[in-house]
Structure formats: C-alpha cells, structure tokens
Amino acid sequence: MADEVEYKKLQTSTGATLAARYHQLLELAGTACDHDLLGRVSQGSYHAGTDQSGGTHDQGGAVDLSIRDLDDKERKKIVRVLREHGAVAWLRNPDQGDWPFHIHALDLGANDLSSAAASQLSLWRDGKNGLKSGAADDGPKIDVKPYVFQEDDMPTTEELVAALVPALKAELAPVIADAVVNAPLDATGFAKQILGEHWGPRELGDVLVNTTARVTRLEATVVAQGEALAELDPEAIQKIARRVAKLVEAQPGHN
C-alpha cells in the first residue's frame, strides 16, 4: 500500500508524469531554491522520451528541467539543491549533445528506474557524468542521500510549528530573549514581546528570519534541547525552521 502511494503517477503543470515521491522532492527542492521546478519539467518519467534521452525516461525517477531563461549561477544553484534533496542532477549543455541547456536529474531513491537511468547512476558512483563520453562528474561534490517520501497523513508544517511553540516557549524563550535583546541587531521590534502570552508561529518566524546569525543560534539551541523536543529529530526541526522562515518572509508587511 505504501508503494502505491509513493509511486502514484501525478501530472505536472507542464503535462509531464512523475511518481508522487519525485513530485514531492521537486516541490520541496523548488521551495529551497526559489524556483517552480515542477513548472520547468520538459521531460518527465514513464514515457519513451527523445532519441537523445537513450531510454532514461522510459520508467520512473527521471526528469529534465528547462532552464534556458536562467543565468549560470541560478542553473548551478538548482543542480546543487536537487542533489541536496536526493536527486543526482547534472547541468547539460549543447557541447555535450544535440540538446539545449537543461538539467537532467535522477531520483536516487527511486525503485523503478529504467536500465538506462540505473546505468547513469552507476557511472555517477564511479565519478562520471552519466554520458557516453565517460567524462568526469561536473556537478557539485555532495553526499547525495535518497529522498525519504512523506505521506499525506504526516503533520503539516503549521501543525508541527504549533506543536513546537509550547516546548520552545518553556525551554528556549529566556535564551532567545536574551540573545535578541542583548545582541546588536538592526531590527528588534519583536524582541521584548518574545516572552509575552501571545508568542506563536508568527513570532517564532520573526526570530528565525531576523538575521542569519539568529537562525544559526536558534537551531543550535533547539538541537541541544533533546529531552524537551524528543519527538522531533534535529534535522526535522531545522527543516521546519527554514520553511517557517520562508512563510513569514512571504507575509505582507513583514520586514
């Protein structure tokens, strides 16, 4: 049953087909790099693909992204973020084959890759770029780990944050308040309200997005509170922190 959910075939806005796990991976990676990656899918999975694809898209776990409108910096950022989220991605260029600039990415954790896609991953493990040329891997040197699919019945980000607030208020409020009030900051309008009765997700978000240094300090402190936050591992907490920060930044009137 779990596989049926994880590998349910979904359509992107571009009409491409992806497994639910890869759809979810691209959605999260898109949030992390500030690009609608699902809206950039030029080739998905489960179809014959083009002659240049060599069968890599015949089964699951393969995607091509259109990035011709982006500069080199943004293209490389997307490749890095994809690798950080569990997809082995490469920036392909016209010098390598009969194709335009695009990103080719394989879901490292997919169990339904085509033989051609699996072969590309084998080449990547050997330090290659997955092409017939046998050239060296030209992507970022990152320890790519398979993406872990999150089923729909898991708590939403908002629910997780709401659950965190009582523990954070009890265990961390004094630490955070001291850091905010006493540290030199450009913006501390929320500082003296952190210990107030209405400290909730919005105020937590303010703490997270105020400065990069504050986020780092908060995450380090949260990780140390193992007993108070035993139900959530540090990596999950940090992911929540980053996602809440983005939500707050997107709110009208937020400075």
Image (tube, rainbow, N blue to C red):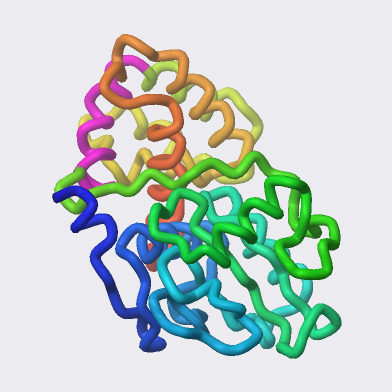
Please identify the quarter of the rendering in which residue 154 is found.
Answer: top left
Residue 81 falls inside the magenta stretch: no
The spot of residue 235 in percent (x, y) is: 45, 32
Q: Give the mark count.
A: 0
- Could you tell whether 165 is left or right of 34 in the image? left
Establish if 98 lies above or below 85: below
Q: Position of residue 206 (x, y in %)?
A: 43, 44
Residue at 75% in and 89% down: 98
Is 71 situated left or right of 238 in this image? right
Q: Position of residue 121 (x, y in %)?
A: 62, 55
Residue 36 shows in this picture: no
Residue under the point 51% across and 51% down: 108
Residue 159 within the magenta-colored segment of the rendering: yes
Q: Along the horizontal axis of the image, is 27 left or right of 65?
A: left
Tell me which segment is drawn in magenta: 155-171
Instruction: Decide: is 217 above or below 121.
Output: above
